[in-house]
Image (cartoon, grey):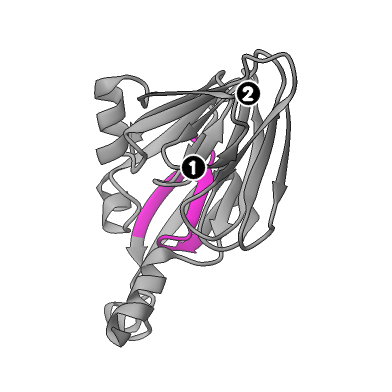
Amino acid sequence: MKSEIKGQPSFCYIHIDLEPGESVIAESDAMASMAADLDMETSFNGGFFSGLLKKFLGGESLFINKFTNNTDSTKRVTLVQATPGEVREVQLNADSDQGLCLQPGAYVSSTPGVKLGIKWAGFGSFIGREGLFKLMVTGTGTLWYGAYGGLFERDIDGEFIVDTAHLVAYQPSMKLKVQLAGGIIASFLGGEGLVTRVEGKGTIILQSRSLSGLAGWVNPRL
């Protein structure tokens, strides 16, 4: 399998070339184009009940599509995410500790060896508009994830403050706490409101834009 991310950084799409017998899994509606002789199978995202949990608690689609190359030559499928922005590719393996935590809606696609689950994120995460649950990605294989805007990394050793709705991915050992940006008056009159305090050691992935910020800018103008 070969893959290439094009259209960076604002309008990313993923070309995946499947060799005979290979498969790739993508969230519902991620396929932009595919070879006519590729087989596509639609199923619940981890089963019926697991799919419901991922949709209503983890912010993911209820269904997933599996694209399989049952021919004798290389075939291409092109995948996109729902929002304009950057997409990244990550290689996971059994030795990569506990995997990766993704915020709701960040998952785009993966190879069959990658497992998706949900984990309680806490009421603080919900108050910070990050959802009550987070998506846990574990297993062995390739993961593609993305977000609205550009993606950039920060290495953390201790504590770090992130504006709510800008955190995309982080390691499961890291802890998140939601708090006011400053005092009550400064937090709300200054426009920052709530922020997320990240505690621990590891790397976090941030997005340069947020959909809630876009909605807040657009709504008064409609």
Mark 2 vs mark 1: in front: 1
In this image, 88 relative to 57: left or right? right
The question of residue 166 being in magenta is answered with yes
- Name the spot of residue 22 as percent of width and height, x first: 64, 17
The question of residue 54 being in magenta is answered with no
Specify the amino acid type for callout 1: Ala
Q: Residue 141 got which mark?
A: 2
When the figure is inspected, residue 52 is found, relative to residue 56, above or below; the finding is: above
In this image, 50 relative to 79: left or right? left
When the figure is inspected, residue 16 is found, relative to residue 139, above or below; the finding is: below
Specify the amino acid type for callout 2: Gly
- CA neighbours of label 1 inside 10 A, class few (<14), some (14 to 19), many (20+): some
- Name the spot of residue 147 as percent of width and height, x first: 52, 54
Residue at the spot x=63%, y=55% of the render?
A: 154
> Residue 187, can we see it?
no
Q: Which residue is mark 1?
A: 30
Residue at the spot x=53%, y=60% of the render?
A: 84
| Stretch of the chain drawn in magenta | 161-178
